[in-house]
Image: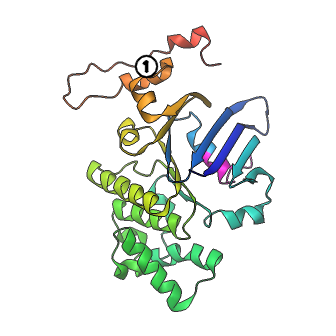
Amino acid sequence: MAQILNVEALNISLKSDPTRFLVRDVSLQLSAGKTTCIVGESGSGKSLTALTIMGLLSEQLISTGKVAFNGVNLTELNNQEMQAVRGAEIGMIFQEPMTSLNPVLTIGYQVGEALTAHLGLKGMALKHRVESLLASVGIPAGRANSYPDELSGGQRQRVMVAMSIACEPSLLIADEPTTALDVTVQAQILALLRALKDEMQMAMLFITHDFGVVTDIADDVIVMFRGEVVEAGPKKQVLEKPQHPYTKALLACVPDAAGKKTLKPIDYAWLEQGEVA
């Protein structure tokens, strides 16, 4: 499989204090048609890594390292050049579908924005493409004139998926896209993303804290803790034979289907052994 993304030695720190790292020495690779899941508790640096790839990092933060996308180092692009990449070649599903959509614009308009900006579609061609995209994610074409508050949480998330794949990107970043959704809708969204990834042969970077989702959708897994990658490898290897104490601790917190497993709180005693700086 062709390599789509190669992140090398990514560091993110405060502009006011460059010695204070929020993400340290993160490296990862994504190939076409494959899904890599980043897991870790809140504050581990998952979303910051994704935002850096998209060139959307806060002005209060600075990053160093290489982010090569299809052979182009994104960190060397200016804002105008990066705008041509975002939405067209890299799509992103942001957290919280309830707040990620503009409440005063119709969902059809919001799905169509990228098509107009990147592909120049207008008029009936734009209308037909928007309706086709909505239909592909299970939203009736007639709902294109609906506003976000007229849709359920699951429907809004489907609209976010339609927006992210509108220009058929080669890389899709999904930042906890099933958070706050009930399990039935979550399963539908995961199945939809998996089908779209296979159909379009996209590389997908999927951020989550749910090992159930990892089991369902991942090819490879990266475990982050305090801004660092502590373990990475194929899904089967990481889930069945974890090597790092933090990975083992996370998996010990996952209940079993039978409800017989004794759940254990994470014990951070291993930090004193210097496993993570």
Magenta residues, dominant SS class? loop
Magenta residues span 50-60
The answer to whether residue 40 of the structure is visible from this angle is no
Rendered position, 167 above or below 184: below
Q: Position of residue 178 (x, y in %)?
A: 39, 50
Q: Amino acid at mark 1?
A: Ile
**Residue most extreme to the top:** 273
Which residue corresponds to the image point at 37% horizontal and 39% vertical from the top-left? 215
Q: Position of residue 4 (x, y in %)?
A: 62, 52
Residue sitting nearer the eye, 57 or 197: 197
Rendered position, 81 above or below 250: below
Which residue corresponds to the image point at 76% horizontal and 40% vertical from the top-left? 65
Q: Position of residue 176 (x, y in %)?
A: 46, 47
Which residue corresponds to the image point at 37% horizontal and 80% vertical from the top-left? 141
Q: Is residue 178 left or right of residue 10?
A: left
Snapshot quadrant of residue 89: bottom right
Q: Which residue is mark 1?
A: 266
